[in-house]
């Protein structure tokens, strides 16, 4: 009987994986390359880089203040292929699939007997709307998420190092991945911060101070050499690590709401589910409601039509069903906190530190930049590993014994997957004809 269940689960996993891959290939081939978050500006950076291979002035364009790794890799692909525009979305698709593979490997490494849990971990990411969208968009988000995930994956498995030399190599790999994350986007700095904090906590539970200090030094040195040079260069030339408030970005200063208050981080209006688009009056000031609507749905309408009752209904259903894996993630983290407190050297420590550092940084960023356009759940893709790890743990516990609860959970997950296929496959269920994104200006101002 157990073999029959495993075979059935394997068959479902294969079908689900094929469908998820088909969605991504369709989107890479059919999604307009200049649509998506800042995509047209990113293409300008890529083209400019391919012409002179020089880092541009931060104020030269919308995206030119960003670190150069993604744009350089994309420029190399473009130059080598005669500007085959589909290669950059395919690059992001491959990066996203690598994150899925890391999530599966992490679960298999920690729970080798739970193959179904590993399948769940992979499926949660394959059918995560933010992951689907960013697989097609020309943006550095997916590459940053990949390197962040690699760093945390190495940290979660640091206990496998059999001696001090192996531990230093592990720290070096974590520092390398963190440095590449920082060189992809400033938000990648959380990877280096998590690595340092993880080793520091190891030192509080018996690891020799000298050994811990060496590992921290290796992380900082390698990450600094690989990714820190760009920010040192900015400081030397422009007097700041990351230029901001540039003339190219001034249009954002006119966007709503224009200010933040503490209640914006407490509000979770019903419109999160009933009208999931970020300019909805009730949702506009809700930071976490807007974030939820962009993690699990196209709250910015870059894939789906703006004014469609059917799209709104699909969003309401999707976001209601998404409460299931979201709740599983939260419950799973509670168990992770208990394990980390009992043994900080566990895999839970870097995973939980990443969640805390990322959400804190996101809250600070949205406070300092109080405009609806900056709230994009896709910027939280660096949390892919903790999400898959903890949500799969709880969902697996809920479904491993046949019964009413298991049936309802599987039904909810299947419904959610169907909704993601409909909302995440470009021009399948809905044809998008207007320019991507929400229009926030009044008609007379356009």
Image (spheres, grey):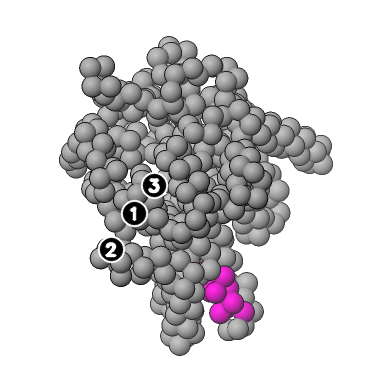
Residue lying at 27% horizontally and 52% vertically, measured from the top left: 244
Q: Which mark is residue 63?
A: 3
Q: Which mark is residue 238?
A: 2
Q: State the image coordinates of residue 184 (x, y, percent, origin top left).
A: 47, 56
Q: Secondary structure at mark 2?
A: helix
Callout 1 crowding tier (Cα within 10 Å): few <14, some 14–19, many ≥20: some
User: Could you say which is closer to the camera, residue 45 or residue 241?
Assistant: 45
* Rendered view: 328 above or below 69: above
Q: Tell whether position 168 is magenta.
A: yes
* Rendered view: 424 above or below 72: above
Q: State the image coordinates of residue 171 (x, y, percent, origin top left).
A: 53, 74
Which image quarter holds the C terminus? top left
Q: Which residues are magenta?
A: 166-174
Q: State the image coordinates of residue 334 (x, y, percent, origin top left).
A: 43, 51
Q: Is the magenta region chiefly helix, strand or loop?
A: helix
Identify the mark nearer the N-term, 2 or 3: 3
Q: Secondary structure at mark 1?
A: helix
Residue lying at 66% horizontally and 34% vertically, measured from the top left: 25
| CB contact under 8 Å: marks 1 and 2 | yes
Would you say 229 lies left or right of 248 here?
Answer: right
Q: Which mark is residue 337?
A: none
| CB contact under 8 Å: marks 2 and 3 | no
How many angstroms separate mark 2 from mark 3 (CA)? 16 Å
Would you say 422 lies left or right of 351 here?
Answer: right
* Rendered view: 229 above or below 413: below
**Residue 351 can be seen in this image:** no
Name the residue tied to disc 1.
Answer: 58
How many angstroms separate mark 1 from mark 3 (CA)? 8 Å
């Amino acid at each position: 009987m157990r073999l029959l269940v495993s075979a059935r689960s394997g068959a479902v996993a294969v079908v689900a994986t094929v469908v998820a891959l088909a969605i991504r290939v369709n989107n890479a081939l059919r999604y307009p390359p200049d649509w998506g978050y800042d995509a047209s500006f990113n293409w300008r950076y890529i083209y400019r880089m391919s012409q002179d291979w020089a880092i541009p002035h931060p104020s030269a364009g919308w995206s030119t203040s960003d670190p150069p790794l993604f744009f350089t890799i994309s420029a190399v692909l473009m130059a080598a292929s005669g500007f085959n525009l589909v290669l950059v979305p395919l690059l992001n698709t491959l990066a996203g699939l690598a994150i899925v593979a890391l999530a599966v490997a992490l679960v298999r490494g920690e729970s080798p007997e739970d193959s179904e849990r590993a399948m769940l971990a992979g499926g949660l990411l394959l059918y995560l709307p933010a992951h689907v969208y960013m697989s097609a968009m020309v943006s550095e988000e997916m590459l940053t998420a990949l390197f962040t995930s690699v760093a945390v994956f190495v940290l979660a498995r640091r206990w496998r190092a059999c001696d001090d030399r192996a531990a230093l190599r592990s720290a070096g790999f974590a520092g390398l991945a963190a440095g590449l994350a920082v060189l992809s986007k400033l938000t990648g700095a959380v990877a280096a911060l998590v690595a340092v904090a993880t080793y520091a906590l190891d030192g509080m539970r018996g690891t020799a101070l000298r050994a811990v200090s060496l590992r921290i030094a290796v992380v900082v040195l390698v990450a600094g050499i690989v990714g820190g040079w760009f920010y040192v260069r900015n400081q030397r030339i422009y007097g700041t690590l990351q230029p901001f408030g540039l003339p190219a970005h001034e249009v954002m200063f006119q966007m709503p709401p224009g200010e933040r208050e503490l209640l914006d981080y407490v509000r979770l209006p019903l419109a999160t589910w009933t009208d999931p688009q970020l300019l909805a009056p009730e949702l506009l000031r809700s930071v976490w409601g807007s974030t939820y609507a962009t993690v699990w749905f196209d709250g910015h309408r870059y894939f789906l039509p703006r004014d469609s009752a059917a799209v709104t209904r699909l969003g309401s259903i999707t976001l209601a069903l998404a409460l299931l894996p979201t709740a599983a993630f939260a419950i799973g983290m509670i168990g992770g906190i208990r394990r980390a407190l009992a043994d900080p050297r566990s895999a839970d420590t870097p995973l939980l530190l990443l969640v805390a550092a990322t959400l804190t940084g996101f809250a600070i960023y949205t406070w300092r930049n109080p405009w609806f356009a900056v709230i994009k759940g896709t910027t939280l893709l660096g949390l892919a590993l903790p999400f898959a790890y903890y949500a799969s743990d709880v969902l697996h516990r809920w479904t491993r014994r046949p019964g009413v609860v298991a049936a309802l959970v599987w039904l909810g997950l299947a419904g959610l997957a169907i909704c993601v296929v409909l909302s995440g496959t470009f021009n399948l269920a809905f044809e998008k004809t207007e320019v991507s994104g929400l229009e926030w200006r009044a008609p007379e101002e356009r």
